[in-house]
């Protein structure tokens, strides 16, 4: 039996995790014909990501004009292509990131005269937010509380993985800063050597000049 104290405890945990994990929301942007707009997302390796996009119909009672078409490409920071659709009104993609880094979703609207402006709805989710919990909690097979606990557990795992990823990025930045400081120290040392060498050559040149002129 679930006690009121346990209910309160679970409610507090769910509230805290809900504050820590900000679910992604749908994004709407405008795109002129003949132009490109790219949206980036930092994704960890082995993370699930899903995306949906569609052109907003300016006239609900009529089909979209022929000019309202999109070409969409999703690539990783290494240049690998994960999704490509040409001249479509809507679409979706889903994949598991093979490498960590910034992933780019680029939208291109075909050139059209006169220029038209497209409104695009784009929803991009990664990690826990990309999971379809409605399919996990099938009717009559999974208890609601069990589903909530599983969701909380996966959220905690996702937060832990995110912290480990951020710690790895921090270590990389520290190594980069250390390497940069060492290089700057050597550059400063070489700069001092060059300056002293130039000063010595100038003194030697002036001394030789004055000796030739029999001034010293």
Image (spheres, rainbow, N blue to C red):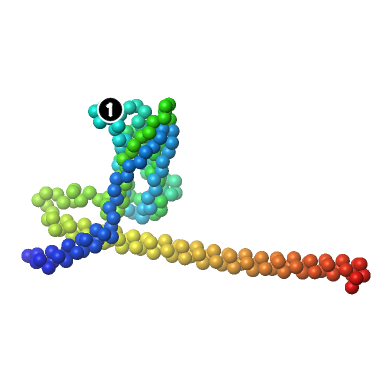
12 left or right, relative to 34: left
Query: Residue 212, located in which quarter of the rendered image?
Result: bottom right
Q: Residue at x 43, y 49 (%)?
A: 77
Could you say which is closer to the camera, residue 214 or residue 140? Answer: 214
31 left or right, relative to 204: left
202 left or right, relative to 77: right
Residue farthest along the left direction in this orientation: 1
The 10 Å Cα crowd at callout 1, few under 14, some 14 to 19, many 20 or more, is few
**Residue 196: % across, % down:** 72, 69
**Residue 90: % across, % down:** 31, 36
Query: Residue 115, located in which quarter of the rendered image?
Result: top left
**Residue 104: % across, % down:** 40, 46
Q: With respect to residue 15, does 86 lie above or below?
A: above
Residue under circle 1? 63
Question: Could one spot residue 144 in this view of the protein?
Answer: yes
Q: Residue at x 83, y 67 (%)?
A: 206
Q: Residue at x 28, y 55 (%)?
A: 22
- Tell me the SS state at disc 1: loop
65 left or right, relative to 172: left
Q: With respect to residue 125, does 3 lie above or below?
A: below
**Residue 41: % across, % down:** 37, 50
Q: Residue at x 74, y 65 (%)?
A: 198
Could you say which is closer to the camera, residue 144 or residue 188? Answer: 188
Quadrant containing the N terminus is: bottom left
Query: Residue 186, located in which quarter of the rendered image?
Result: bottom right
Residue farthest along the bottom direction in this orientation: 216
Q: With respect to residue 39, does 128 lie above or below?
A: below
């Amino acid at each position: 039996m679930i006690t009121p104290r346990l209910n309160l405890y679970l409610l507090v945990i769910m509230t805290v995790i809900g504050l820590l994990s900000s679910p992604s929301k749908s994004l709407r942007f405008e795109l002129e014909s003949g132009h490109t707009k790219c949206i980036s997302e930092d994704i960890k390796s082995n993370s699930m990501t899903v995306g949906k996009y569609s052109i907003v119909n300016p006239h609900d009672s009529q089909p979209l004009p022929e000019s309202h078409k999109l070409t969409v490409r999703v690539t990783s920071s290494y240049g690998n292509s994960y999704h490509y659709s040409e001249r479509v009104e809507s679409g979706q993609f889903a994949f598991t990131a093979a490498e960590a880094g910034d992933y780019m979703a680029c939208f291109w609207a075909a050139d059209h005269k006169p220029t038209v402006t497209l409104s695009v709805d784009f929803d991009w989710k990664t990690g826990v937010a990309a999971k379809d919990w409605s399919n996990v909690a099938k009717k009559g097979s999974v208890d609601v509380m069990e589903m909530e606990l599983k969701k909380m557990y996966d959220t905690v795992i996702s937060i832990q993985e995110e912290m480990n990823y951020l710690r790895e990025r921090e270590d990389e930045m520290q190594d980069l800063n250390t390497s940069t400081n060492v290089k700057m120290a050597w550059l400063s040392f070489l700069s001092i050597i060059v300056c002293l060498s130039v000063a010595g050559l100038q003194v030697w040149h002036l001394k030789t000049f004055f000796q030739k002129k029999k001034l010293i």
